[in-house]
Image (cartoon, rainbow, N blue to C red):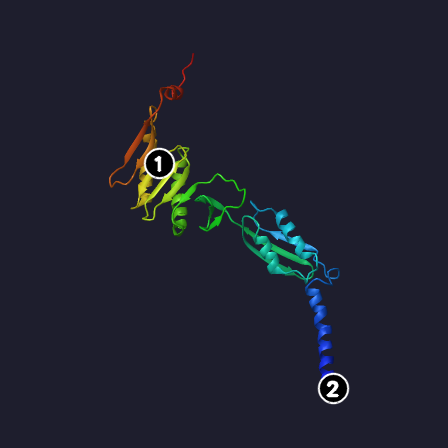
Amino acid sequence: MMKAFFRLTAWSLAIALVVLPVAAVLNGWIGGERWPMRHLRVSGEFNLVTDQQVRETVLPSVNKGYFAVNLEQVRTSIAALPWVKQVDVRKRWPDRLEVTVMEYKPLARWGEKNLLAENGEIFAIPKNAKFKLPMFEGPDASAGDMLSFYSYAKPLFLTMGLQVESVRVSARGSWSLTLNDGLEIDVGRGEPQHRLARFARLMPQIKNDELKRQLVRADLRYTNGFALSWKEISKAKVENNLPQGNT
């Protein structure tokens, strides 16, 4: 029994002599100076996240040496930065850490608390973020369709110097949008792109009638046409818009 006890103790000590140094290196207790992490490579297309932000976030995790760097911890820390969508972290022997960051690219506001990325993903608005973006309102499942509709509608009005300010789709699939001059357009459900394109073709002709009144609403929910609502323009505004002759 005593021999078996001493043999077990000897084996335990031998294992401890192997395991403890390895654990010490992996935890950064020792070895940080012998195997330091000397190089950090940060890559990605940075518009909203800065290279400096990433480096400052990574630095506390690399000061205990190559073996002590916890890749998951580094990844989680960077992912917590505003605007970060995806992070890839790799160690390269003997002394390099490589970090690749992918940002969210916001295309529109999604309600009051979220943003919509160009790939259709909805994410929370980062703190203190200020953007002048079009407003989208609709069911979350419609995000991709709304992006497609917006991409189609936007160039239709650019030639007239107008921007699409908001896009809405109801739970029943009825589309509407607002331009930056205040014009509200009810597009409806059936073939919304076709209806909008037909209206946009006639917009320059319609706009010619805006000297004394302003178009405020267009209802395209008709098979063979649309209904227009106008607002009278004050006399002072009309006079200011009249061509000035030579004196």
Q: Pointer 1: residues within 10 angstroms few (<14), some, or many (20+)? A: some
Residue 161 as seen in the image, left or right of residue 97: left
Coordinates of residue 79 in the picture (x, y in percent):
56, 53
Please give the name of the residue rendered at 71% of the width and 65% of the height, measured from the top-left corner: 25
Coordinates of residue 208 in the picture (x, y in percent):
33, 27
Please give the name of the residue rendered at 43% of the width and 41% of the height, measured from the top-left corner: 135
Residue nearer the viewer, 193 or 27: 27
Q: For mark 1, what is the residue?
A: 184
Quarter of the image where the N terminus is located:
bottom right
Which residue is outermost to the bottom?
1
- Give above or below for 103 relative to 242: below
Q: Pointer 2: residues within 10 angstroms few (<14), some, or many (20+)? A: few
Mark 1: which secondary structure? strand
Residue 82 as seen in the image, left or right of residue 107: right
In primary-sequence order, the first of circles 2 and 1 is 2
User: Would you say the residues marked 2 and 1 are in contact, meaning their CB atoms lie under 8 Å apart?
Assistant: no
Which residue is outermost to the top?
247
Quarter of the image where the C terminus is located:
top left
Res 2 label: 2
Residue nearer the viewer, 217 or 111: 111
Q: Nearer the viewer, mark 2 or mark 1?
A: 2
Coordinates of residue 11 in the picture (x, y in percent):
72, 79
Q: Amino acid at mark 1?
A: Glu
Q: Amino acid at mark 2?
A: Met
Mark 2: which secondary structure? helix
Coordinates of residue 195 in the picture (x, y in percent):
31, 41
Residue nearer the viewer, 129 or 95: 129
